[in-house]
Amino acid sequence: MCGIAGVINKKKTVNVGEQMGLMLQGLKHRGPDSTGYAMYGTPLKKGFVMRFKISENEAEKVNATVDSPADLKNRKNAVDSILKKHGAKVTKESSSTPYAFRYIFDFKGDLTDLATEIETVEKTEILSIGKGLELIKDLGDANTVSNQYGLDKFMGTHGIGHTRMATESDVDIKSAHPYWAFPFEDVSVVHNGQLTNYWGNRRVLERKGYRFNSNCDSEIIAVYIADKMANGIELEKAMHDSLDELDGVFTYVVATKDQLGMAKDHMAAKPMVIYESKDIVACASEEVAIRNIFPHEIKTYDPYEAEVKVWQA
Amino acid sequence: MAGITKRTTAFDDENLSGRSQKLYFEVTEEENYTYYGNHEVDFNKRTSIDCEGIDAHALNQKIRDAIRKGYGSIVIKNPGAKHSLGVGILNKLNLIFEGSLGYFGIGCIDGPTVRVNGRVGWSCAENMMSGKVVVENNAGSCFGAALRGGDLIVKGDAGARTGIDMKGGTILIGGNAGAYTGFMMQRGRIIVCGDVNANMGDSMYDGIIFVGGEPHSLGTDCVPGEMNEHEVRWLEQKIKNAEIDCKVPASKFKKYVAGRMLWNYDNLEPAEKKGILG
């Protein structure tokens, strides 16, 4: 039982960080283990924004890591030198925790090569690379993560998020959602449910050369969608295909640089409530999350089984 | 083989079958039954409770306190789609929610008349024994799960598995219903004015589903039945009473019943049934 949420503001930049924070805090009871945000800010005209982590938040205590400061420093230096080697020029860097960083860099080469090499550094994982996408995930509830990373003032058009109740993999950042569709810029996924043909699909996708960072079944949705889109298939068509090719019970939300989409399986076994108006679309596992941003009465509905919806920013 | 028991109900010629129903189910009981410790309430005595800033437990306690003081009409303001509101009310009461409910709203009730001026989430009115519930907007999945009696009405659409495992009563849906509507239903009636999605009435043992539109597909052991004029009259009356603007005339509704091919439900002792159902 995880909680998922998504919000898209049509043709308007607002404080999407605050919107997502309120919605995810409303879903805390569905999963208190970790919270993740994938938010889409104003797209950069040149260069990329990258979020990455060089260690795990292993302990119960927030900010506690088992790696020594020297280890962290070495890993960060290794990442910096790889960026330099590939000709990427870092123009801005910041960090909210000792193990998570945000870089803005100019780059003209092959993003896949760069990302693959960065991830060869021990315990290092790229959370996201994109023009607008910034993916932040950590242990704790929505407010904890939002305060830690200063997300309550994030301006953007749309975002998705997840509160996780760990069932089939560990409580750590790499198993937390959302998942970035490596190596495609600006594609991310959150998921509620279980996939039963995970290993079979994973083998097929790994043979095609995709990499998996965790053993979490949700990651496969991001890679699956990315694979389809790489073959020129539209997001909506790829999502329709997924309903037949992925097995299990699931509802997931996917976002690209200017789109938000949701899909529900044939059994309609996992919840989703949608509110649509001409300015904004909000969807969440429970209405109580949407009501955190709309205190007044609103008209909401449940999508039916095998339903796919895509909205444009 | 156990004999088929005939009993007169709302439908003059309806056969109620199965020993368990003869022994354990009394159709008229819900009308007259009152619990020990129930309170006399006056429907003209009104009060309102604001749900802003309080949780489900506190609100449910306040409703009980108001019933104890004899209030017969209670308006709940700002329910804010919170979960488990108004559960376990075993008293005659006129209860109005001025907004949406979250999951498990008004579950396990016996007697009250409830109006929800909004939407309800998953498992609304689960295990309801008697009374009447009217939802003005849409309903989530598992609407009226394990319903045992009373009328459950939603004017908009209902989600998947509506009336799952229901054992009596009537569910009336003004719009469309989701997949697996009437899944494993054992008694009672579901009326859907619009369309029904895939696998309607899957594994149903008994009961009737009336559909104004089209079911997308029928589940295992759900078969078309034949409408008689009593049922047409009953449908007309039910839809009229619920104030639903149904485009399909009652005579054009389709009826679906259990094919009774999965296994012989009538021939088993209750203990044996328990074993089979696990």
Image: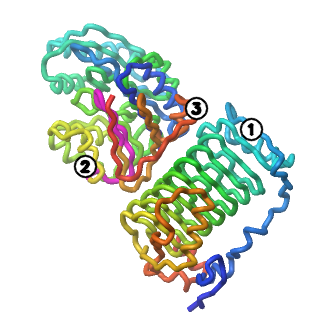
Badge 1 and badge 2 in a common chain: no
The image quadrant that residue A69 belongs to is top left
Q: Which mark is residue A296?
A: 3
Instruction: Write down the residue under mark 2.
Output: A241
Residue at image coords 29%, 38%: A222
Q: Nearer the viewer, mark 1 or mark 2?
A: 1
Q: Position of residue A200 (x, y in %)?
A: 24, 51
Residue at image coords 66%, 78%: B9
- The alpha-carbon separation of the residues under discs 1 and 3 comes to 17 Å
Secondary structure category for the residue under label 2: helix
Amino acid carrying label 2: it is: Asp
Instruction: Write down the residue under mark 1.
Output: B49
Q: Is residue A247 magenta?
A: yes
Q: Nearer the viewer, mark 2 or mark 3?
A: 3
Q: Is residue A20 magenta?
A: no
Residue at image coords 54%, 47%: B137
Magenta segment, which residues? Answer: A245-262
The chain that hosts pointer 3 is: A
Residue A141 visible to the viewer: no
